[in-house]
Amino acid sequence: MSRNPLVLALSLFCLNPGTAPCQECPCDADLNHDGIVDSSDSDIVFFCFGSPPINDCAGADLDCDGVIDKTDYYIVECHECSLPDDCCGSAPRTARPIVLHCVPSVWTGDDTCDGDPNPCRADFLCANEHCGSKNRYLSFVTRSDLIAPHALRLKLIDVNGFPSMNGQIRWAGPPAEYVDSGSNAVFIASPLQCSPHFQDWSGVGLMHVFGDAIVPSSMYQVRVVSEECYTTGDLWCMGPSEEFTTVTWGNTVEPFAGGSQPNFGDVSAIVDAFRAGSNAPSVPRADLVGVGNPGQPNTPNRVVNFGDISAGVDAFRGLAYPYTITSCP
């Protein structure tokens, strides 16, 4: 994307907020001018993601680099959560953890965010095996009061290796029960689809969303949408957004960060899941590929088999993620 030379020049100067040209880059995160910085301001950044700062997106380019991107999102979240940081300064914002809200319509555990009463928390990692960082699934708990028909809307924000897919929308399809080969416990999983599926989600609880569009090292946004909201097409009547990230290709057990991931421990964990070992990771964590999934080779098949072991070995050897994503019409 080409950038306005004047805007780009100003952004270079504004890496040092003490310089005079930064007066032209106000870095005002209160995008809707209601006097507070909150999730409605970050929603504006998401709505404008990948766009130039024009028309309704004119104020969302907070670092004045000519495009609305993750850096602008980090700035809003930094202001919202009052992080001990210079939100608009020269700190490497791309290295900062994503800040997550723990009180939206979809959340990642209980309503204290895994025991943390702080409504803004950084470095999202779920506190137990069942939710949190995975390769090919997103896992969350739906609110118990979602009784009226709603749909779960997933937006592709930053899909690693597939930049042309960024901004596309998927929807959680009808959930179904599957048996975890290790624990024999039943887990609930929902396939991604191109059209919304409305239902009462109040009794679903912990669910795992899967599809070829969920790939490693990527970022997604989930929102709850009522039937009325979908009919009107109004972004602002959707539920608050929740952001999820997937981990490095082949990384199935902790640690989920560091340059040595995945390692042999990840391969061993997939083998344990295949053998249905008592300490094996869950199927949504160890299921990497769709081998044996007729007609959908790029989509996980809700079981752990030799295909997953082979994929884990390839990832350990440093081979790139090999699968593709089908675009919605």
Image (tube, rainbow, N blue to C red):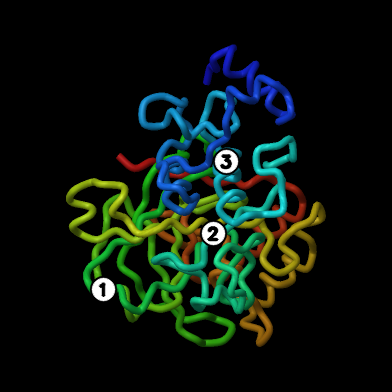
Q: Nearer the viewer, residue 141 or 97?
A: 97
Question: Disc 2 vs disc 3: which is toward the camera?
Answer: 3
Question: Disc 3 vs disc 1: which is toward the camera?
Answer: 3
Q: Residue furthest top?
A: 5
Residue 99 visible, this angle: yes
Above or below, comparing residue 322 to residue 17 in the picture: below
Above or below, comparing residue 310 to residue 231 in the picture: below
Q: Nearer the viewer, residue 120 or 137?
A: 120
Residue lying at 45% horizontally and 40% vertically, measured from the top left: 31
Q: Residues within 10 Å of mark 2 (few under 14, many from 20)?
A: many
The residue beneath circle 2 is 136
Residue lying at 38% horizontally and 74% vertically, measured from the top left: 143
**x and y, in percent, of residue 291 in the image:** 51, 59
* Chain-order first, disc 3 or disc 1: 3
The residue beneath circle 1 is 200
Residue lying at 36% horizontally and 31% vertically, measured from the top left: 56
Q: Residue furthest right?
A: 260
Distance from disc 2 to disc 1, alpha carbons, whole Å, reads 25 Å
Distance from disc 3 to disc 1, alpha carbons, whole Å, reads 33 Å
Q: Amino acid at mark 1?
A: Asp
Distance from disc 2 to disc 3, alpha carbons, whole Å, reads 22 Å
Q: Amino acid at mark 3?
A: Lys
On residue 135, which mark appears?
none
Q: Secondary structure at mark 3?
A: helix
Q: Nearer the viewer, residue 38 or 71?
A: 38
Q: How many marks?
A: 3
Above or below, comparing residue 208 to residue 81 in the picture: below
The residue beneath circle 3 is 70
Q: Secondary structure at mark 1?
A: loop
| Side of 236 where 100 appears, left or right | right
